[in-house]
Image (tube, rainbow, N blue to C red):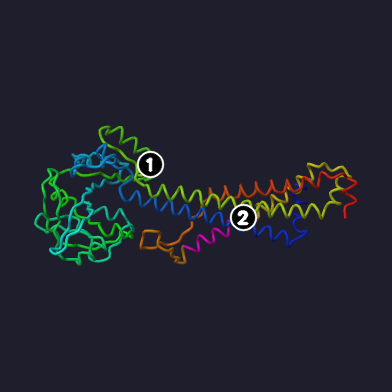
Amino acid sequence: MKWLYLAWKNLGRNRRRTLATLLLTAVAVLGIMALSGFALYTYESLKEASMRKEGQVILSHPDYFQREENTPMELGLGRVQQLQQELQADPGIDTTLAQINFDGLVSNGEKSTIFMGQGVQPESFQRQGPGVDLKQGRWLTPELSSQAVPEVLLGQRLAASLKVQPGDGLTLLGTTTKGVLNALDVSVRGIISTGIPELDARLLKVHLQSAQELLATDQVSQLGVYLQNPHQDKNYDQKIRDQYPELGVTPWQERATFYQSVRNLYNRIFGVMGVILLVMVAFAIFNTASMSVMERTRELGTLAALGTRRREILGLFIQEALLIGLLGSLLGLIMAAGLSLGLYWVDVQMPPPPGQTDGYPLYIYWSPWMAGITSLAVVLFAVLAAGLATLKGINKPIVEALNHV
């Protein structure tokens, strides 16, 4: 403990230099925590969006995601209601939502254009959260009456192209499972936006039953399984695969290509930036330790002449660097926590990502495990830098050290 006490007292010898090194270490820790916190927030947001979109586990025909359909619903999924009843009997499953993916033409009587349709159950809009924004009108009604005109939701740019508003009528043209052209008169219920202009120019959502009526089928394209605990998706992936070996069982990760791409990109970019910040800390502490050794060379010679072993002198400088690393890390973590809390109170909006029209709020997650890893890395770099800087000074002969000016 006496060596640690001496190391603490030595930090006060040149307070300005110690404070500068301490602040640089703290800023580096703040930078690493801010970068990693932003990355973690992005990962979690994209992960939740991917799971909300189609479910934690997706059931389909075994070849549905492997090859293109030659005719509508060629790779459809049958006995859907029975599957939903069986799956929802499992206490670990919250709900299941069926979906049909199809395309065709939509016409306002004067103009026709291609659409990408989704036959959905209205409960899916509650699951998708902020991913789909209602611009005008209302969401699809929970239940579709057999005597009511089928309702649709149009992408914002598709509605602008057709010059329609909520309440206007349209006609959907599609091909049935037998290759016959079919038409369905619908009413515009609302106008939505996904934030992706290309998708908004083609997107059309309709009740699942209306899509089945247009395609003349009782099948669906896929069945999304939403779990009570989303973190159990890996266990349920295998469990459902064992229960239904004849079906295609796809975990959400395999469908979340955008999430995987962003994660790989950010890991590389922020990883390199984190290493650069750690190297800056190492250089700062190396410089501080080198100057301290140069100023205290005669002192080191005196300690050696009195019988102090070189490893004890080396340990003293290492402990000084250790204290700087620990204090700088603590200060940096406190600053990072303050920044993270501050962003929850102050509404800071990020600009829209490439290919999107809507921005998003800036948040930075404060992760305990990342704080531990960062502090450990900073301390290790500090100790190594101080050790390298001190070795040259303590290896000088005693007489030369005592005569150093």
Q: Which mark is residue 232?
A: 1
Q: Secondary structure at mark 2?
A: helix
Q: Residue at x 33, y 51 (%)?
A: 52
Rendered location of residue 273, percent (x, y) = 56, 53
Q: Residue at x 16, y 50 (%)?
A: 209
Q: How many marks?
A: 2
Q: Report the side of 401 relative to 20 (left or right).
A: right
Dominant SS type (magenta): helix
Q: Earlier in the sequence, mark 1 or mark 2?
A: 1
Rendered location of residue 368, percent (x, y) = 53, 50
Rendered location of residue 71, percent (x, y) = 18, 43
Q: Nearer the viewer, residue 186 or 51?
A: 186
Rendered location of residue 165, percent (x, y) = 20, 67
Q: Is residue 335 magenta?
A: yes
Q: Nearer the viewer, residue 365 or 216?
A: 216
Question: Would you say the residues marked 1 and 2 are in contact, meaning their CB atoms lie under 8 Å apart?
Answer: no
Q: Residue at x 61, y 59 (%)?
A: 27
Q: Report the side of 234 relative to 220 (left or right).
A: right
Q: Which mark is residue 330?
A: 2
> In whole angstroms, how far apart are the C-alphas of marks 1 and 2?
34 Å
The type of residue carrying mark 2 is Leu
The type of residue carrying mark 1 is Gln
In the image, the segment drawn in magenta is 333-343
